[in-house]
Image (cartoon, rainbow, N blue to C red):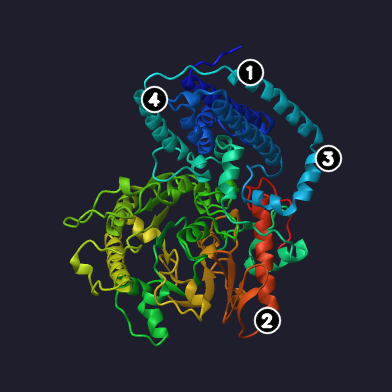
Amino acid sequence: MLRIQHAYSRIALVTGIFLAAFFIGRLALFTIYHPSFAELSFGQVVFSFVHGIRFDASIMVTFIGIPFLFMILPHRWAVSRLWQGLFSWYFYLVMVVFVFLQISDLIYFGFVQRHAGPEVTLLTGDMELMLDMLLNEHRIALILFISATLGGGILWHRLFSRPLAVPGKALPRYGAIVLLFVAIIIVGRGGLQYKPARVADAFISGSTASGYLSLNGPFAIFHAARGTRPVTKQFMPEQTAISLVRKQITSPHETYIDDSYPLLRSSAVKAGSTPTKPNIVIFLLESWDAAHIDYFRKQQGQAPYSITPNFDELMKKGRLYSRFYAAGTRSMDGIAGTLAAVPTLPGLPYIGTGMDQNRLSYLAEFAKDHGYSTLFLQSSNRGSFRLDSIAAKAGFETYLGAEDIPPAHKDAEPKKLWGVWDYSTFMAANEVFAKQQQPFLGYIFSSSTHNPWRVPAKQWLKYPEDNEHHKYMNSLYYADWALGRFMAEAKKHKYFDNTIFFITGDHISGFEQDPNYLPSRYHIPLLVFGPGIQPGIDDRIGSQLDITPTIIDIARWKTAHSSVGRSLFDDSDIDNRDALCINGTIIDLIWQKSWMSHNLNQRLNVHIEGKQTVESLEQQILATHQVVMKGMLENRIYHKPTQATASVSE
């Protein structure tokens, strides 16, 4: 029997036992569900096990790190049986809970092929059902677990029952406590990276299987449970909901191929005037909205601001979608919408905080399947919004953050907040695009128009900085200048003539929003221009969820995709297009001149004009939520099909 005599060795033993339990859980996951990880090489498996220690240690010290400090206090009463026993049994309780969660997660993995996510918050809503399943379907496992817990308790008592030696000098011990506290902070946040580790960081390698293997149940469950509770009520028969959604999002040349994945559909190659394999470049511009662009202001009878002259000039050469809307009110909504064509439904984690566990329909993966190289640049730090992990998971091969982008302004001061100036990012993008083998997909996320709205020099102070709105407009004036400089430089390179550009915002600025006109909450510009794109104003309704199917359409990719959107170049049934937008726990639907807000319990805001009815709008909201939420919770949004299992187009 191992006898514990020193406080430090006791901490080491507890740590070792916890990490061993996580290792065994990960090994069980790998062994039981080996087909899910068969694609991983030996090196990737080793990486996953080693990388997993980061998440194991993080969740461990989150719950037992601070108690370690109390265990090693340099006082006689701190080595008493009562004091030490209190913490020792607390550690054992945490251990039991972690093991229970790992076993539960292991079982759950078999159903949806991913770790438990936000759906864990539903357990308290139906405890009777959970207890029934536990006492019946998993009764034997429960008996074994209880027996192991009791047996483990006896062993635990024997391991930690011997009194500790009385500490010597107090000063060295307090020094150790300070060092241990610092270590706990670092380990608890998962390292020294930009932001504390979250679920998305498990997918840093870009492999879904590796990410699942790196994660552990307690870590995934804890971070998912910190979100709001998802609503899983069945509002209508499943087939009715699926039919309503498919009717809204399906283009004539698309065919549904798997009844188990209601959104999964194939796109045939459609003849068109666009060049073969055009480069695609997407600008996701921070806080760019329609309210500050002169075309929209003139349409509303408002005086022009003249702060986007370069965008206004580009409009003459491209196709402006005048009724285009953001998928939500935050950047992460826009990123999920443009990268994966899915909304962040109320109660679900954002992309980067848990949504990534699902198999999603990533634009960059489709591009790679068609021989494209993929590049992602953002003006903020690499880890901002956890976009380094998100980009890898989404299929981007090259990723550049602020730390990788040299300053392009000669005399301007370095940007103190939100990374580097947009001009630097845009110039870096042009440089890497010019060197990149074609075709390529480029994605650029800007930041200079984010609060606190600063500009590099006085030349962009079009308005006095006497209020926040003026500061924002100055930053927009600067960002527009940077966009113009990018285009001027890009035209000097060969890639430009074979590139289709998508320029849009991530969400509105919040200024000039009409509280009585719901669409203004999401109204952003979308400008598409390049070879084969007919210039003009397009008044059909669209949203960020439409970008992926639009690119698949105009690039003439033959692929299967799952999206909650429809190609903006699909001219069928134009008058029945809609935009689904999320505002926290509220779902908004914009449809022609009508709109509705809904919290899944009741209608909150309704405006009806034309042929739509209150009932039809409500049914569309509830059907979309029901289909997408079910797909998310069951991990049935997307899979790469091997053969068709259904062929019904709604």
Q: Quadrant of the C terminus?
A: bottom right
Residue depicted at 51% across the width and 63% down the height = 547
Give the image location of residue 64, x and y in percent. Answer: 53, 34
| Mark 1 or mark 2, earlier in chain | 1
Of residues 310 and 379, which is closer to you in this image?
379
**Comparing labels 2 and 4, the label whose residue is closer to the camera:** 4
Residue for badge 1:
158
| Residue situated in front as seen by the camera: 624 or 324 | 624
* Amino acid on which the number 1 mark rests in the picture: Arg
Looking at this view, name the residue that lies furthest to the left.
Answer: 411
Tell me if 542 is positioned left or right of 490 in this view. Answer: right
Q: Which comes before the other along the chain, label 3 or label 2?
A: 3
Q: Earlier in the sequence, mark 1 or mark 3?
A: 3
Tag 2 residue: 613
Decide if residue 92 is on the left or right side of residue 203: right
Q: Earlier in the sequence, mark 2 or mark 4?
A: 4
